[in-house]
Amino acid sequence: MTLPHHHIRSTVGAYLARHPHEREQLGPLLDALDRTGEDIASRSTFTGHITCGAIVVDQLGRVLHVHLTSGKVLAPGGHAEPTDDSLTAAALRELHEETGIPARAVAPWPGYEAVPVDIDIHDIDAHPGKGEPGHLHFDLRFLFRLHNPNDVQVVPQAEEVGGVQWRPVDRVTSPTLREKLLKLPLQGEPETANASALIYNDRGEYLLHLRDYLPGQIWEPGMWSLLGGGREPQDATLEHTVRRELAEEAGLDLADLAPFDIEYATDDAGTTVPIAIFAGRWNGDARELHLTEGVLLAWFAPADLPRLRIAETTSDLVRRHAASLPASQIGSTPTSQEERRASPHGAVLNVIGVHLYLERPDGTVLLGLRHPDSAFAPSTWHVLAGHCEQENAIACLIREAEEEAGLHIERSDVELVHVVHHIDRAGDRPRMGLFFRARAWSGEPELREPDKCTQWRFWDPAALPGDLVPYTRLAIEKIQSGELYSETGWPA
């Protein structure tokens, strides 16, 4: 799955809030963001797509550059990949791939944890050998500081990188980047930074944390606040910080967390600390969480905030996030506190999964063996599948078939053959699995995403593998018998 459209849009919006005079020159990027159905995170979108760069500064204020075998000298960077869960993660992966510098060896520059230091648009020449026409790159560049150069072994990527060089700021090759870096104090140790989680559910409520009343010992004593805390040396990014804090404070592990905003807080000593805010959806029961710090966790609607002891900055943050959510993402608001606590019975949006049922004339069905490191069903067979993004289900199916296996399917050759409504584990979000048959297609299955699928194979439906995703086995059986609908995982 490529990077979410809203993540790219919010990141570009945060950048333009700092550089409003660049709106006109970023017009092609803004136009691409406004085009419906266009995935600008995919390198196969040749009207223009994003790339992510890592601008790494050492303790002397020098900036890392790579000497490409093409002769160019640039900061490390490249295309986003389906495995990247954020733009900064893409930049850090490219840094590691091109130079051998791991993500843990750098830290986001304070104030630039989720906002690019520079965005550049440039033309890329056509490459007939790869079947690529001329197109635009929208290059989002993120700023990092190297922890300790003595602990890092630089190993250039042999295929593309001939060497590396640390350049003074006034010799940075990109003019727009050089101009911005010259305005920053790049020497000296960076200040501390925090990260907090803005957790919301499908009823439009927000998870707040009642802090201990320990004046002089903790931040905002006795007040309702967000879960989160300060970055520690082992945190490669502030997303690592917020995930670590959620696990330590409440045993929470959210599948999706996206950068939302940067806030600034000032303590009693007058020190200003940037706080990166990450937003994530969760529909669980707050009473079942194992809280290790503070007094209580509870859900509150934005309308409840005036009656709470809560910082105005936190209230404003919640209201702004609530206002940013499309009405279609929020279920009906509960009318009583008891209804709010009854999480499993509230309005809950279901995840929509699209699945390809590809059957050859001999009756065998295509399955893929998922990678051992997959978060879902590792080392298990499954049909080609993906989650619907801002697109209709058939468009999703066609896109996933091309991205994952290099198969080309026409919309007119697609038919719905089964729907399975399932829950994988108790407490998980419900999922609606749509299985579509492709009556015709072109191409043979190939491993386009080897980090997700390690092999494709056609199986006899009467002799399916034992290690097959259970709801997939059920769906194939029902398709074979001509049944359109099934359910699994729901309590009796």
Image (cartoon, helix red, strand yellow):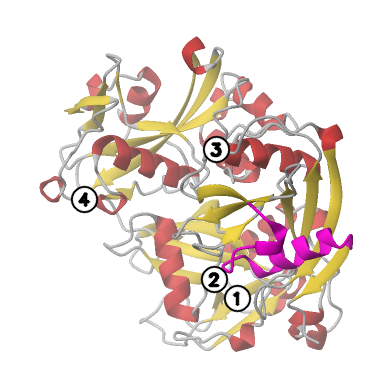
Amino acid, disc 1: Leu
Amino acid, disc 4: His
Tag on residue 226?
Answer: 2
Dot in front, 2 or 4: 4
In this rendering, does residue 33 appear at all? yes
* Extreme residue in the front direction: 362
**Which callout, 3 or 4, points at the residue further toward the start of the chain?**
4
Element under disc 1: strand
* Extreme residue in the left direction: 150
**Which callout, 2 or 3, points at the residue further toward the start of the chain?**
2
The percent position of residue 49, horizontal first and vertical second, equals 56, 27
Residue indicated by mark 1: 208
Distance of label 1 from label 4 (alpha carbons): 33 Å
Tag on residue 147?
Answer: 4
Tag on residue 446?
Answer: 3
- Magenta stretch: residue 268 in it? no
Distance of label 2 from label 4 (alpha carbons): 28 Å
Dot in front, 2 or 3: 3
Say if mark 1 contacts mark 2, CB within 8 Å.
Answer: yes
Dot in front, 3 or 1: 3
Say if mark 1 contacts mark 4, CB within 8 Å.
Answer: no
**Which callout, 2 or 4, points at the residue further toward the start of the chain?**
4
Task: From the viewer's perspective, tell me whether residue 3 is left or right of residue 401.
Answer: left
- Magenta stretch: residue 466 in it? yes
